[in-house]
Every structure is written in C-alpha cells, then in structure tokens.
DNA sequence: AGGAATTGCTAAATCGTTTTAGGGACAAGC
DNA sequence: GCTTGTCCCTAAAACGATTTAGCAATTCCT
C-alpha cells in the first residue's frame, strides 16, 4: 500500500479509510497523519483486492459484460443487457451471483481494453459494434472465456448475425414491388460488416431485377443529421429517387426530414425502408417499414449461446444466422 | 480452488485453464482429468483474484461506474459515459488507468447491487434514475467513495439536477405566451423527483396566470406508446387541448402520433413542449421545442464533480442546479 | 552402473486489502 | 516491585489465482 510513506502499517491505513479509527482506538494524531498522506498521495484503493478479500468464499461471483463501441447507438445493446440480466437473475441463488455491465471501447481499439486478454475482468462477454480492426484482433486471439459476437462473422467465436444477403434483398423486393424505378441506398461512410452486406445485397438485387444498379448516397456518419445532409444533397442535385433503403434507422430518420423539406411525400413520392434498429421506428412519421432481423430473436440467440458457453454445454463456436423479418408500416 | 477435487494442485489446474499444458509438460491424462473436473464442477474463475494477480503493481487501475435502472432510457446515461471516458482518457498515463462501465439495477433495488456497500466494485460512481426506495437507501448510507447523484436531491451526496421549479414554469410560459387556453400536462404514472417537479411547476404557473389548473393526462409508462394511448383517450373524450407539455420526450413522441391521428396540426392546433431528453428530439416532425437543462451542462457538472471528489479537491457534498435552457423549434 | 537429461508435477511467493489476535509501553493500584 | 488495565498499534492470515523455482521419478547416454 502506498501509504507506508508515513511510517505506519497497512492495517492502520485500512482502519482509517473505513472510518473505524474510533472503535479501534487510533490516536487522533495518527488518523490525521494518515488522512493527509492519503490526500497527498492521491491514494486510490484497489478494488480487485478489496473484492477478493470481501467476498464470501461460499458464493461465486460471475461477471458478464456487453462490449460495444462508444460511437454506436445503445438500443440493441440495452436490450441484450436486459435479457442477459433476466437469465442471470433466474440463475442467481445462494452460492451464485451475477453482475452484468456495459463496457465501451473506442471503435477500432478493442484490443486496448484492460483485462480482456488476461481474462481478469469478465467471465463472459457479448461483443458488438466492432470495426474491421477489432475484428482482425479478435480473429487473431481467441479469448479464453465465453464470448458471443453480434453482427460479425468470426470463425473462432460464436456469432449471431443477419442471414447474409437477406435483408438487402428483401428491402429491394419491397421497393421494386411498389413500382419504384429510381431506388437509392443510403449508407454511412464507414461500413460495418452488417451494413456493408445489406447495401451490397440491395444493389445486387436491384441490378439483377432492373438491369441498373441503384444510386448510392453516402452519409458522413450514421446520425440522423448525416442522413438528412446526404439525402438533401442528392435530392437538391436533381438526381432522382422514388424509393430509399437506409441501412440503419438513424439515417432513415434524417432522410425523412430531407424528403419532407423537399416537399415530397412518404411513401407516395419516396418510399422508405429501414432495418428496425431504432427504438422508436414505429413512431416515425410515417411509421418506418423495416426489414431486419428480429431483435427478440437476436437477443435470445445471443443470450442462450452465452450461457451455453459458460456452462460448457457448447464448446465449438457456431454461427447463427437470424433471418430478417419484415414489418410493414406506412413508409413503404 | 474448487478443483482439488481431482487430487491435483492448483498450479496444474491453472496451467490447463490457460492452455499452457504443452509448454509446461503436463501429462495428457492429467489434462483430461482436470478438464473433466472443470466441466463437471462448473468451475468459474474468480476475476478479482485474477486481476489482483495479473495487474502491474506500477499501474493503478481506477474503476468508474454509471449506475442506472434497467427500466430507464439510456440517452443521458450514454452521454455521461462518453464524457466520463473523455476525462478518464485525458488522465490516463503510465501508472494510471481507467475503466468506465454502465451497471444497472432493478428500479427500487439499488441496495442489492453487489459491491456497492463495501466499495469493492467501483472507485467512483454516477447514480441516476433512482426510485424513492433507492433514494431513502442512499440517504441512509453514505457510500465511502466518490458519488454523484443525477436528478435527485440527497443531502449526503453531490447532486446535479434541474433548477427546481424552473423547467415547468418556462414550459407553461411558452404555451401561454402562444395564447394557449387549454394547456395539458402529460406525465407517466410513476413520477421521479424530476418529472414530478416539472409537472407541479407547470400546473402552478398555469394556475397562477389563468386561474385554472391545466388538465393532467397520465400515461401508463414513459414509452411513446404510453403517451399516444393516454393522449388519444383524452382527445377522444372530447376534452380540450391546445397546448401540451410532456415531462419526458418519449411521451411527446407518442403524443405527436395521437395528435396527428386526431387530424390536429402541430403547433397550429396543439403546440407541444418537451424537455430535450431524447436523442433525436430535433428530428421529430415537427422538431420538438424543448425546455430542460442542457445536457452538456449536466454532463459537464457531473463529471467535474466526480473527478473533484476522487482527487479530494472537493470533500463536502454540494447541490448543483442546472437552469433550463430553451430550444425553440417548430412544435411551439 | 552412474551421471545427465527429461518428464510431470508441486510448493511457495505474490498481488492489495481487511480483520483478528495480540504485543509493547505506560499508568494505576496493591 | 508486581499485577492489572488501558492505549495504540502491528503481525499475520486470508481471499483465489498465476508464475517461478525446483524436486522426484523415470529415461537416456556412455
């Protein structure tokens, strides 16, 4: 402990920090001396040591984490967390105890997260919203505990993701089925594996069915304002659009504004299809038609796999594809 | 360690778990025996012990947490987290290292969260979205580390919250200033300290200025669907409304739908004022006029206080009131 | 057969904290 | 002077894992 600096034992410091110097009869002068040292040295107690010491040997504490990047929206993450907690609560009892938390990493810098590699932070994790750099890191190092990856395909981990190619294809079919002649796909500049797949499948389907590839509008980020700016530029330049596929709902929300500002109607002038990754897609105006994996199914798959891994009921990694479900609402 | 069950030493078990039995030349039979025991006993490694052992004595690891209830939305929480992380990153260096995470508790059962009382989980926390039960728990036990409470007034902690009475009053003034004669306040059934204060101030102001208290519409929860249902019922019953104050933006979003479904226009027929606690309030249609504490200010206050407490630059708890800022958009 | 090398495992130290038992110094009482 | 008590503090064990050093048994080499 840092504070042997004052020539006093660790026990005395501990006593003072726990505010038990009265009952343990430390001299007021010593208490003051210790307090001062604690302040001066900026002492921070080590939680791992405290916990190791404090915990009841009879009860096992299991740490679960949901790892996501700072930049990503939390909607799906929070749903995963709630479901994980539900399962955890069901398994909690005397002798077993769970903590579930969300930890964030800077996109592309997952590898820097403390305790990941040496398994000193979590007993099991769900990882999502990784960038390609994170994916290569993960692919290169198999973490020695229960890991489920959401939305990415990595051979050495259990993965849960959209059935590849499906969402984009169905979205294209919906727009073409309504008679759209000038479909547009709206994507962020930095594509994740899922968004890239959706866009590619959409383009391929449109090309196959009409002979022309759809226009591709690229937004700076995935916030609504990025979507609005990008689509406004596209419409303002007079390039046609009568159907829009946004690979994430935030972009669709921004697109709505651009469309309305351009005095076009949804879906009459421009039909819009999203993916269902926004909490309130059904309260957009008009409510957003979505083609994407059902969040319930995804969450359920993730959580059962996580617990199966932890129970060692599953050992080999598996890929689970969740087929998109179509929720027709008023926007297309 | 559990697995002395097989008559082998802890070191051997550790070796196998780390998959280093090759380099350390354990007999394949022993490895199998250990693996089987690990499986059969459902062994879960203790992360606290691992961490204590694994960490470099030269670097101090500081754990920060943001504690919120499962039931609450994550918008403000995620903003707090990002800001905390930014400050943490700025203070990270050789010898100092932060982990920031979100941990959730069941509303009203904060006291059950493991490691809170014995300080064995976090070096500092931000607590928010507490229910009255949690508040009484907190008021009764001063946690022995850095704590900042968001949106509640507790004498023994640093608190950051709306200036009491201000938001509701300003909202009322905006609606009355537009000439509204039948203002309505939309609240969830379960009021937190902040929402209760907003509703009360709104009602008091309207009563003072017009002589009649506003109608109070109570939604079952704080999701948009709850708001839509509640307002639909109100409008359907033919009770008047030409101005609406929603104490949380989710309700406003639901109200938008009910208003449009009733063929009323926003703001011409019904003006709407929210509080600015939804990430995309500026992309509602029409964009939502908000009166509420600026999220930047709140987040900044919280985070500086948290770090001041940890540095012991502040010792006594303080209350910080953040005055509402008004963001006029198209809805009122 | 005797020494060297290899194989397969264990003992012990360590991480930082808390708690329990107890010890030394001094004062008071006989 | 010896016992008893009080005051103030420390030593040591414990928490559960990992790692390092090393020991015994077996095999290999000459």
Image: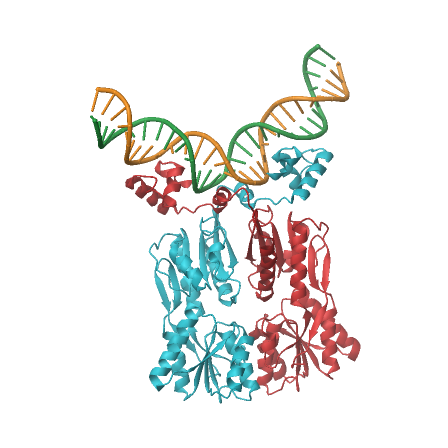
Chain colours: A cyan, B red, C orange, D green
Compared across the picture, whether A163 is left or right of B315 comes to left
In the rendered image, is residue B200 in sight? no
Location of residue A128 by image quarter? bottom left
Q: Quadrant of the N terminus of chain B?
A: top left
Which of the two residues, A122 or A95, is positioned nearer the viewer here? Answer: A122
Q: Quadrant of the C terminus of chain B?
A: bottom right
Q: Position of residue A225 (x, y in %)?
A: 56, 76
Question: Is C3 rendered above or below residue B232?
Answer: above
Compared across the picture, whether B173 is left or right of A244 comes to right
Which of the two residues, A262 or B129, is positioned nearer the viewer here? Answer: A262
Compared across the picture, whether B35 is left or right of A186 comes to left
Question: Is A31 rendered above or below residue A264?
Answer: above
Q: Position of residue A78 (x, y in %)?
A: 51, 64
Q: Position of residue A244 (x, y in %)?
A: 46, 82
In the rendered image, is residue B289 in sight? yes
Please give the name of the residue rendered at 42% of the width and 84% of the height, measured from the top-left corner: A175
Please give the name of the residue rendered at 63% of the width and 73% of the height, measured from the top-left corner: B218
């Amino acid at each position: 402990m840092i504070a042997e600096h004052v020539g006093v034992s660790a026990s005395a410091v501990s006593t003072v920090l726990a505010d038990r110097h009265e009952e343990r009869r430390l001299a007021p002068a010593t208490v003051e001396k210790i307090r001062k040292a604690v302040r001066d040295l900026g002492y921070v107690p080590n939680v791992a040591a405290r916990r190791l010491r404090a915990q009841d040997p009879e009860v096992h504490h299991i740490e679960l984490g949901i790892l996501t990047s700072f930049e990503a929206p939390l909607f799906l993450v929070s749903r995963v967390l709630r479901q994980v907690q539900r399962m955890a609560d069901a398994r909690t009892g005397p002798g077993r105890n769970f903590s579930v938390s969300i930890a964030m990493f800077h996109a592309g810098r997952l590898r820097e997260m403390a305790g990941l590699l040496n398994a000193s932070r979590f007993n099991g994790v769900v990882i999502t919203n990784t960038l390609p750099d994170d994916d290569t890191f993960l692919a290169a190092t198999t973490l020695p505990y229960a890991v489920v990856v959401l939305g990415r395909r990595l051979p050495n981990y259990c993965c849960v993701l959209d059935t590849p190619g499906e969402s984009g294809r169905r979205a294209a079919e919906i727009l073409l089925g309504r008679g759209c002649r000038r479909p547009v796909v709206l994507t962020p500049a930095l594509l994740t594996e899922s968004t890239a797949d959706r866009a590619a499948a959409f383009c391929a389907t449109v090309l196959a069915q009409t002979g022309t590839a759809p226009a591709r509008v690229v937004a700076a980020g995935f916030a609504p304002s990025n979507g609005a700016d990008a689509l406004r530029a596209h419409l303002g330049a007079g390039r046609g659009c009568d159907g829009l596929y946004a690979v994430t709902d935030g972009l669709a929300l921004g697109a709505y504004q651009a469309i309305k500002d351009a005095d076009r109607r949804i879906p009459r002038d421009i039909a819009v299809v999203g993916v269902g990754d926004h909490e309130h897609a059904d309260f957009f105006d008009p409510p957003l038609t979505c083609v994407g994996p059902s969040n319930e199914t995804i969450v359920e798959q993730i959580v059962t796999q996580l617990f199966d891994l932890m129970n060692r009921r599953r050992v080999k990694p598996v890929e689970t594809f969740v087929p998109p479900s179509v929720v027709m609402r008023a926007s297309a």
